[in-house]
């Protein structure tokens, strides 16, 4: 390896940036590396802190967005500007232990693989309900999509230049990184570690944020939900068909008077509900298609110290 690039997205991380850099410098004493900090529209002094570090360290680069575009966009910007032949992606909050980097480099160089990814084997420090939902999501996702996500997989990973170039070819606007990382394929080795709580600051993920992120993932990687309406359509047409025969025969033989208002209402409500649900799913895909065809840039750079 000649050069290692570390890509670090930062959103309101003023208290983590310096600690992170110190930690990396200590860990990578004998390795030639560059760091690209991506300031994703922070509203605190994250950018100022990054600039301070960049002033005295030539290998520290930064890209600052014009607003918050999200971690996925920040990752794309970082990968695009990475010059290294190995590229590492990690969070700034030290939840991704830097001491794994030498081990990752060793693995990628000596074992036959293109990606070394990491996975948390515990979710210590995380609310129980969040962990159970996360597990449920992975089960559901893997069942209905063609790619397999690994439970507890972090975005923290080391990739070869070839894998990075493949990722950069996926230029979609709605970026679900966890899926994209899997989608490109390549031989991946997994390193496992215990969950570590943030060094400072707070996670920017709310519970509902995670739920909507999961929906994004499903919409981005499978169209199975679109078949749900077809499925219900077939089932209910079949039931209706049987019922019609049943009612006709019943009326012919028994000349039954009109009855069953309540059951009719229930059926109408149920069908209405399923129809709206299906339209909602359709709308979700349409929304994604809409944002894709607009072909807007994935991010906008306000300032940077990277010169091409
Ligand atoms: N992040 C970002 N843009 C955002 C949200 C987060 O660049 O809109 C960065 C954040 O600064 C951190 C990483 O993405 O370096 C992961 O965020 P966080 O620690 O909040 O997520 P968690 O570790 O809880 O999954
Ligand atoms: Mg974190």
Image (spheres, rainbow, N blue to C red):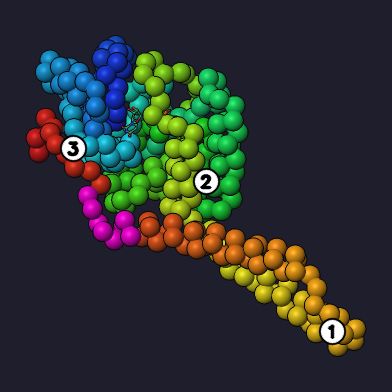
The residues colored magenta run: 290-297
Q: Nearer the viewer, residue 245 or 10?
A: 245
Q: Is the residue indicated by label 2 positioned so its CB lies within 8 Å of ligand 1? A: no
Residue at 26% across, 59% down: 294
The vertical placement of 253 against 192, above or below, is below
- Label for residue 113? none
Q: Position of residue 218 (x, y in %)?
A: 48, 50
**Disc number lying in front (3 or 1):** 1
**Which quadrant of the figure contains the C terminus?**
top left
Q: Is residue 87 left or right of residue 210?
A: left
The vertical placement of 245 against 282, above or below, is below
Q: Which one is earlier in the sequence, the residue at label 1 or at label 2?
A: 2
Report the residue marked by disc 3.
Answer: 66
Report the residue marked by disc 1.
Answer: 251
The answer, for residue 197, to whether it is visible in the render is yes
Check contact, mark 3 vs mark 2: CB within 8 A.
no
Report the residue marked by disc 2.
Answer: 148
Query: Is label 2 in a helix, a strand or a loop?
Result: loop
The answer, for residue 108, to whether it is visible in the render is no
The vertical placement of 305 against 272, above or below, is above
Q: Is residue 293 left or right of residue 302?
A: right
CA distance separating discs 3 and 1: 71 Å
**Disc number lying in front (1 or 2):** 1
Q: Is residue 21 one of those drawn in magenta? A: no
Q: Nearer the viewer, residue 302 or 171?
A: 302
Q: Position of residue 139 (x, y in %)?
A: 59, 43
Q: Which one is earlier in the sequence, the residue at label 3 or at label 2?
A: 3
The vertical placement of 82 against 284, above or below, is above
């Amino acid at each position: 390896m000649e050069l290692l690039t570390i890509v670090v997205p930062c959103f309101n991380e003023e208290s983590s940036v310096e600690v992170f850099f110190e930690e990396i410098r200590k860990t990578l004493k004998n390795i030639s590396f560059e760091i690209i900090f991506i300031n994703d529209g922070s509203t605190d002094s994250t950018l100022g802190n990054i600039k301070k570090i960049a002033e005295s360290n030539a290998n520290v680069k930064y890209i600052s967005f014009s607003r918050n575009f999200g971690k996925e966009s920040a990752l794309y910007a970082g990968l695009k500007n990475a010059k290294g032949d190995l590229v590492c992606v990690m969070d700034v909050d030290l939840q991704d232990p830097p001491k794994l980097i030498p081990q990752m480099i060793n693995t990628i160089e000596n074992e036959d693989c293109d990606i070394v990814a990491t996975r948390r084997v515990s979710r210590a420090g995380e609310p129980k309900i969040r962990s159970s939902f996360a597990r449920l999501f992975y089960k559901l996702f893997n069942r209905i999509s063609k790619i397999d996500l690994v439970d507890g997989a972090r975005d923290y990973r080391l990739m070869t230049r070839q894998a990075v170039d493949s990722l950069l070819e996926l230029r979609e606007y709605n970026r679900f990184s966890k899926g994209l990382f899997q989608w490109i394929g390549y031989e991946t080795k997994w390193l496992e570690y215990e969950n570590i709580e943030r060094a400072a600051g707070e996670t920017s993920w709310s519970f509902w944020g995670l739920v909507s992120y999961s929906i994004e993932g499903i919409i981005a990687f499978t169209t199975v939900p679109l078949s749900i309406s077809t499925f219900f359509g077939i089932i209910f047409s079949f039931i209706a068909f049987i019922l019609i025969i049943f009612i006709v025969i019943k009326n012919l033989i028994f000349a039954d008077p009109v009855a069953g208002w309540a059951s009719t209402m229930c059926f109408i409500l149920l069908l209405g509900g399923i129809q709206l649900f299906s339209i909602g799913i359709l709308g979700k895909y349409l929304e994604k298609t809409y944002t894709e065809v607009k072909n807007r840039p994935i991010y906008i750079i306000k300032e940077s110290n990277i010169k091409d």
